[in-house]
Amino acid sequence: MSDWTRDAKCRGQDQRLWFVENREWNAEAKRICSECPVKRPCLEGALERREKYGIWGGRKFGKLEREDYDPPAWKIVERKRRTA
């Protein structure tokens, strides 16, 4: 796990906020991102990994999943780091 992820405001939050298409949830995710001290490395990491979906560093990438999807967000990030 990258050092910056320990300080991320999204830690411990419902990860669906960042990965499911829902205006209210996504607005809340972006609000949390706006106050996050590691917003920049989060966004930079998403750009480096060429994220295809999700909200990273306050920016929406691609089409998000439908509301009944429950992604293991931290596992996705860790899997991508191991394969990079």
Image (spheres, helix red, strand yellow):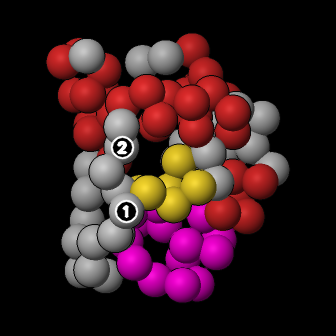
Q: Residue 61's image quarter?
A: bottom left
| Region rendered in magenta | 16-29
Q: Is residue 78 among what the camera can see?
A: yes
Residue 16 lies left or right of residue 45; in this view the side is: left
Q: Residue 84's image quarter?
A: top left
Residue 78 lies left or right of residue 2; in this view the side is: left
Q: Hey, what amino acid is under mark 1?
A: Gly
Residue 46 lies left or right of residue 53; in this view the side is: right
Q: Nearer the viewer, residue 21 or 17?
A: 21
Q: Secondary structure at mark 2?
A: loop
Q: Nearer the viewer, residue 35 or 55?
A: 55
Q: Hey, what amino acid is under mark 2?
A: Glu
Answer with mark 2 or mark 1, whichever residue precedes in sequence.
2
Query: In the rendering, which numbered label is found on residue 80?
Result: none
Residue annotated with mark 2: 51
Q: Is residue 23 magenta?
A: yes
Relative image position of residue 25 (x, y in whole percent): 54, 77
Whole-Å distance between the Cαs marked 2 and 1?
8 Å
Q: Quadrant of the N terminus?
A: top left
Say which residue appears at 58% left-offset and 55% top-offset: 59
Query: In the rendering, which numbered label is found on residue 62?
Result: 1
